[in-house]
Image: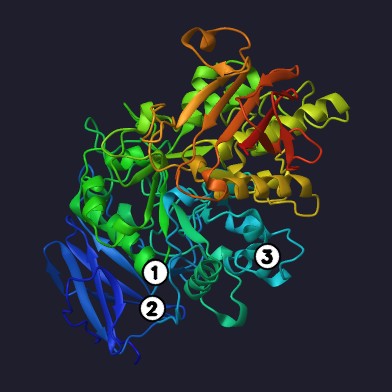
């Protein structure tokens, strides 16, 4: 574009679409602010900032058009407004565009930052050759989710080129694609990739925000995960990653944080939303408009009850689906998004979002914040009851067989309403927030001292068991318990109805040394340790997933009822070790840690393995348990405690289950 001078004026342009958009001849800028009195566009040209008043305001949207402007131009806004309760206008501040597709520069908490290095919004060129990219569109019933951190997944991977480790390109490298295919997962669930900030407290302590749940921009991908090989832009590298994963049949699901922003509480920085229109973008307390509702626990709560803020979130979601080709979202603290807003209704009617996977973390920190089971059809939810009951059943003995049976059957008492299927529940044993699988059986208590909060942070109710010794052990009895329990927990996850989610690295035997809140540990404590990976556990996990894929009765789309079908078969029969169906009294009588269930074929007319009856036997006790089998001949498909866990062994009459183990058998 030509040189900007003091005589340069913006043309009126148009109030839509919001943000900065290049049309080939110039750039249209539009910014919503219901309470602004004046807005200036600030153009960065080297170390010089040119300020140009936006000439027009239409329906609370300020807009202008700059002829000759093109992609690569960096800009910000000055916003002028009233000085009254609820407003935080400060025209001296450079404010980022909430709709910016890319940000440059580095944010500093220094009260007098350098303009040359301060964050800037960037005009982008949206062109990209997607080729024949198509979404895998894996049915929910066939999905196996894999929660992973973009950087941590590959930062230490010897098979990923050094220049690509810790990046979007690295995640889609041949070495990672090979691992994903070996495991059999169908989707990667990426921890936040929206551009985020490190909190001041962390920086002061020499730490950073590793997880990324501190969003600054809902459209811009995080640049610290970009390799930029060959000068490729951050956006292009992200798209290339998606395209490569899709080509391997793997969906991309993003963990998104629309409940709060990086501007935190009333003492936090003013970077964007707060300075543009504080009272519109945030929920303010009724008693004092200088303070924020804090349902997120992070200082503020985004106000989706405002139509323009709801539009921001919806536009962001559509952008990531339409322009970045992602396949779904997991919504952090999703209960916050439903408070006094039309968010759920907006999603339900949206034609772009109707075809993708929507997953809720169904709680927040506000009043009545636990919403498990209360999301509508079309949504799946993180099922923390599965996590807690499964841990308590195997590790502490605090959960009885009846409760475990409910989780194995898909938690129907939670999700079975309004036509929802078992896939409404996303089952997990561990996730990024909490212990890893290995730590779950190695630590009784959290060990978060490295976080700099005197071990006060992180959840204290871990429902874990150290198997007899805290942390690292060379006691063969302790090690055997841990070995058996990790495999039993994984087997429970993959034989249960619902959608399984595996935390990335659990299949490697990953440890965080007992840290259950490693959000600020961007180092080898959290990065996957491929050099010391437990290859036998990887193989065990992969073969469990393969068994789940082979037998549709492990991933039914209809609820188990225990009733007979047209062929006289009952879809499930709960089995007592004594060789009979469980009766009412059996659920509350010894043996309290032994449980079995028989699953009839999901599709009775099939002639292959999927038409076979399955039998799952569980022994969580510390002693061996004998199970008398249903009549007929049975073939053992998996014994979680065996040295060769997938050896196919015939059985008839009775079998013995090792302590803390699961067996899966099919009827011959």
Of the 4 image quadrants, the one containing the N terminus is: bottom left
Query: Is 353 or 316 nearer to us in this picture?
Result: 353
Place of residue 315 in the rendered image (x, y in percent of width and height, measured from the top left): 29, 61
Secondary structure under the numbered disc 3 in the rendered image: loop
At x 49%, y 20%, the residue is 403
Query: Is 25 or 137 nearer to us in this picture?
Result: 137
Is residue 156 among what the camera can see?
Answer: yes
Residues under numbered marks 1 and 2 in contact, where contact means CB atoms less than 8 Å apart: yes
Secondary structure under the numbered disc 2 in the rendered image: loop
Calculate the distance from the C-alpha at mark 3 to the C-alpha at mark 1. Answer: 24 Å
Calculate the distance from the C-alpha at mark 3 to the C-alpha at mark 2. Answer: 26 Å
Disc 2 designates what residue?
A: 126
Furthest residue toward left: 59
Specify whether 15 is left or right of 659.
left
Specify whether 176 is left or right of 81.
right
Place of residue 443 in the rendered image (x, y in percent of width and height, measured from the top left): 71, 27
Mark 3 or mark 1: whose residue is earlier in sequence: 1
Calculate the distance from the C-alpha at mark 1 to the C-alpha at mark 2. Answer: 9 Å
Q: Which mark is residue 602?
A: none
Place of residue 288 in the rendered image (x, y in percent of width and height, measured from the top left): 24, 33
- In which image quadrant can residue 468 be found? top right
Pair 1/2: label in front: 2
Question: Which of the colour schemes (rainbow, by chain, secondary structure, one colour) is used?
Answer: rainbow
Disc 1 designates what residue?
A: 101
Q: Which mark is residue 165?
A: 3
At x 30%, y 87%, the residue is 5
């Amino acid at each position: 574009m030509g040189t900007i001078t003091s005589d340069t004026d913006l043309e009126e342009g148009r109030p839509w679409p919001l943000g900065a958009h290049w049309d080939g001849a110039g750039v249209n800028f539009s910014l919503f602010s219901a309470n602004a009195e004046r807005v200036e566009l600030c153009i960065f040209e080297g170390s010089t900032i040119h300020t140009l008043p936006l000439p027009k305001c239409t329906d609370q949207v300020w807009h202008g058009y700059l002829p000759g402007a093109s992609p690569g131009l960096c800009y910000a806004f000055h916003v002028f407004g009233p000085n009254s309760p609820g407003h935080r206008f400060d025209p001296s501040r450079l404010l980022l565009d909430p709709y910016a597709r890319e940000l440059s520069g580095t944010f500093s908490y220094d009260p007098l930052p350098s303009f040359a290095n301060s964050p800037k919004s960037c005009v982008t060129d949206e062109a990209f050759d997607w080729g024949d990219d198509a979404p895998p569109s894996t049915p929910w019933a066939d999905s196996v989710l894999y929660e992973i951190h973009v950087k941590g997944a590959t930062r230490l991977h010897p098979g990923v080129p050094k220049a690509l480790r810790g990046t979007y390109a690295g995640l889609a490298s041949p070495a990672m694609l090979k691992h994903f295919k070996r495991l059999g997962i169908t989707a990667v669930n990426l921890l936040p990739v929206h551009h985020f900030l490190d909190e001041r407290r962390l920086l002061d302590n020499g730490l950073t925000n590793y997880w990324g749940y501190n969003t600054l921009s809902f459209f811009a991908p995080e640049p610290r995960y970009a390799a930029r090989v060959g000068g490729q832009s951050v956006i292009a590298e992200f798209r290339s990653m998606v395209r490569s994963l899709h080509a391997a049949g793997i969906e991309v699901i993003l963990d998104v944080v629309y409940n709060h922003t990086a501007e935190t509480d009333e003492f936090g920085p003013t970077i964007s939303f707060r300075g543009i229109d504080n009272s519109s973008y945030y929920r303010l307390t009724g008693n004092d408009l200088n303070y924020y509702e804090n349902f997120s626990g992070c200082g503020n709560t985004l106000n989706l009850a405002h139509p323009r803020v709801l539009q921001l979130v919806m536009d962001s979601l559509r952008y990531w689906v339409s322009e970045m080709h992602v396949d779904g979202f997991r919504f952090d603290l999703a209960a916050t998004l439903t408070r006094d807003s039309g968010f759920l209704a907006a999603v339900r009617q949206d034609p772009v979002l109707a075809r993708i996977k929507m997953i809720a973390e169904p709680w927040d920190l506000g009043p009545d914040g636990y919403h498990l089971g209360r999301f509508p059809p079309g949504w799946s939810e993180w099922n923390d009851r599965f996590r807690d009951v499964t841990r308590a059943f195997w590790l502490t003995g605090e959960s009885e067989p009846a409760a475990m049976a409910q989780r194995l059957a898909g938690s129907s008492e939670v999700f079975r309403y309004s036509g929802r299927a078992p896939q409404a529940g996303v089952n997990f044993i561990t996730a990024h927030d909490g212990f890893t699988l290995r730590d779950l059986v190695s630590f009784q208590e959290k060990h978060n001292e490295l976080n700099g909060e005197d071990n006060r942070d992180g959840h204290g109710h871990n429902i874990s068991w150290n198997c007899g010794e805290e942390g690292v052990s060379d006691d063969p009895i302790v090690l055997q318990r841990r070995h058996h329990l990790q495999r039993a927990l994984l087997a429970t996850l993959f034989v249960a109805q619902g959608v399984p989610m595996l935390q990335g690295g659990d299949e490697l035997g990953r440890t965080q040394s007992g840290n259950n809140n490693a959000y600020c540990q961007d180092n080898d404590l959290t990065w996957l340790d491929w050099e010391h990976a437990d290859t036998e556990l990887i193989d065990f996990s992969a073969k469990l997933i393969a068994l789940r894929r082979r037998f549709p009765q492990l991933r039914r789309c209809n609820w188990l009822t225990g009733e007979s079908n047209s062929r006289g078969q009952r879809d499930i029969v709960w089995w007592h070790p004594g060789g009979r169906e469980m009766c009412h009294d059996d659920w509350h009588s010894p043996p309290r840690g032994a449980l079995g269930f028989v699953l009839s074929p999901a599709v009775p007319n099939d002639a292959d393995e999927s038409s076979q009856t399955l039998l799952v036997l569980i022994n969580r006790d510390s002693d061996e348990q004998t199970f008398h089998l249903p009549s007929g001949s049975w073939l053992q498909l998996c014994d979680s405690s065996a040295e060769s866990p997938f050896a196919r062994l015939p059985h008839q009459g009775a079998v013995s289950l090792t302590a803390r183990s699961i067996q899966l058998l099919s009827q011959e």
